[in-house]
Amino acid sequence: MEYVRGVAFIAEVAISFALMLTVLFASNHDLLSRYTPYFVGALYAIFITLETPLSGMSMNPARTSGSAFLGRYWHALWVYFLAPTLGMLVAAEFFLRVRRGTQQVDPKETTKHETAQQHHEIGL
């Protein structure tokens, strides 16, 4: 049973990482930003096909907890809360490290709204 949980954890981290990274790179690219919803839809279709047999493909802790509540099945629920969060945080960190220094930020434009990179650098 631990093997199945490990596979589910890795699969959930991987699909969350890929989805978040796709959203971050596509939405922050001038030419690709308008196609971000299509990229997300295509990834979901691929993930449903490939990952559902491994873990049931949660990607959403609310969906998983609702099903668990109705089915009264709480085993390995932690996988579906921890793995997507971890995958998306790792993707965000990866995105910030890849993009570091490639964008020029105008200080006048960031007085009200900090960029994600500045927010990350000051440790908030």
Image (tube, rainbow, N blue to C red):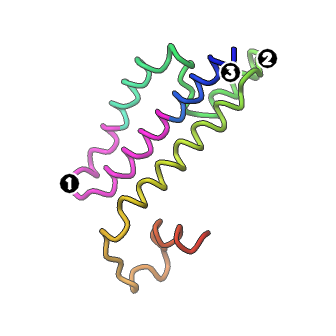
The residue pinned by badge 3 equals 67
Question: What is the three-letter code of the residue carrying label 2?
Answer: Arg
Query: Residue 92 location, x and y as percent?
Result: 48, 53
Residue displayed at 32% across by 45% down? 36
Q: Quadrant of the C terminus?
A: bottom right
Does 25 sit left or right of 115 as displayed?
A: left
Does 75 sit left or right of 51 as displayed?
A: right
Q: Residues within 10 Å of mark 2 (few under 14, many from 20)?
A: few
Question: What is the three-letter code of the residue carrying label 1?
Answer: Leu
Query: Residue 6 location, x and y as percent?
Result: 62, 24
**96 versus 110 height, above or below:** above
- Residue 31's mark? 1
Separation of disc 1 and disc 3 at Cα? Answer: 39 Å
- Residue 12's mark? none
Secondary structure beneath dot 2 equals loop
Query: Residue 38 location, x and y as percent?
Result: 30, 37
The residue pinned by badge 2 equals 72
Q: Are marks 2 and 1 in contact (CB under 8 Å)?
A: no
Secondary structure beneath dot 3 equals helix
